[in-house]
Amino acid sequence: MKSIMLFKFLFAVSLFCLLVGCNRPVFMSMGTAPLPVYHEPRWSGEQDKKWVVSGDAFVGPDGVGENVREVFSLGGDLSVMYRFMNPLFVQASFAGTMGDLRFGCSDIPCTTEYDRWRDRHDEKYSFWTMQERMLLGSDFMLGSLVQAGFGVGALLFQAGGQYENAREELESADIADNANGKEEIYPVVGSWFGFNLGRHARLGVIKNEAYVVMSNDLPQGGVMTAGVNYYHPSGFHGGLSYSAQMGIMFQAGKSFSF
């Protein structure tokens, strides 16, 4: 009898949430997801060139993230990598982006209070982010055609703009929660796997790359950026990636090895 009453109660609560909205939205900083930073492939097993300097630009035309939508982003990055004790490397990267977005509700249904707030504030909100990343890792060639590697390190970000201020105000008004603040440092891991095109990669290299920041405070315990990139032996490269906060991004750049 008690089990039947409990079932009826849970069913009534579920129906009420479906009709009026029960999920309190959670927001993340736009600096949470790793911005796309290239990792120059190996062009030979011994890799005689030790230093790689890369510069890139990227744009995200219309993304969807954690309770945000219509995200437009534009930015760039600068990266310096040093290879030592083959096949180890250390990489330092700096990236920045700016753009605008609208508030959304990916945790459907959201609370009625938040939906009413969105109806009154449907304009676009600006944002900007800066990220610094240090990565220690290893990359290697499996035979003459396959490349693979991984890295671990830390990601530090700072963020600001109208969006960051608005999500703080929503939390202060007890309408929403925030997973993180405007400045955070997280562990980050990266991995890549790709193929040489042509003998000795004379036609270039195509690689799948992924980076994940990890924290118990973040939804699902982490946020990932993954993409597919093409590298030409001349140093030019480009591709596309998917960021958990900014959606699909297109990027292109140039690397110099010496």
Image: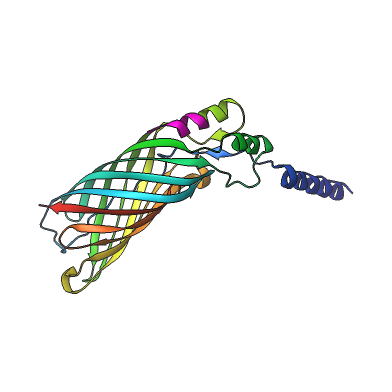
Please give the name of the residue rendered at 51% of the width and 29% of the height, measured from the top-left corner. 168
Please give the name of the residue rendered at 54% of the width and 27% of the height, measured from the top-left corner. 169
Q: Quadrant of residue 17?
A: top right
Report the colour scheme.
rainbow
Which span of residues is magenta-colored?
A: 159-167
29 to the left or right of 18: left
9 to the left or right of 238: right
Instruction: Locate residue 236, reporting x and y percent.
Output: 20, 58
Between 149 and 258, the residue placed more toward the observer is: 258
Instruction: Locate residue 89, reporting x and y percent.
Output: 21, 50
Report if residue 14 is visible in the image.
Answer: yes
Instruction: Locate residue 125, reporting x and y percent.
Output: 47, 36
Please give the name of the residue rendered at 35% of the width and 49% of the height, measured from the top-left corner. 59
Instruction: Locate residue 229, reporting x and y percent.
Output: 30, 60
Between 71 and 49, the residue placed more toward the observer is: 71
Between 206 and 166, the residue placed more toward the observer is: 166
Report if residue 34 is visible in the image.
Answer: no
Between 40 and 231, the residue placed more toward the observer is: 231
Q: Quadrant of residue 131?
A: top left
In the picture shown, does residue 58 fall above or below 195? above
Please give the name of the residue rendered at 51% of the width and 36% of the height, measured from the top-left corner. 179
Q: Main secondary structure of the magenta part?
A: helix
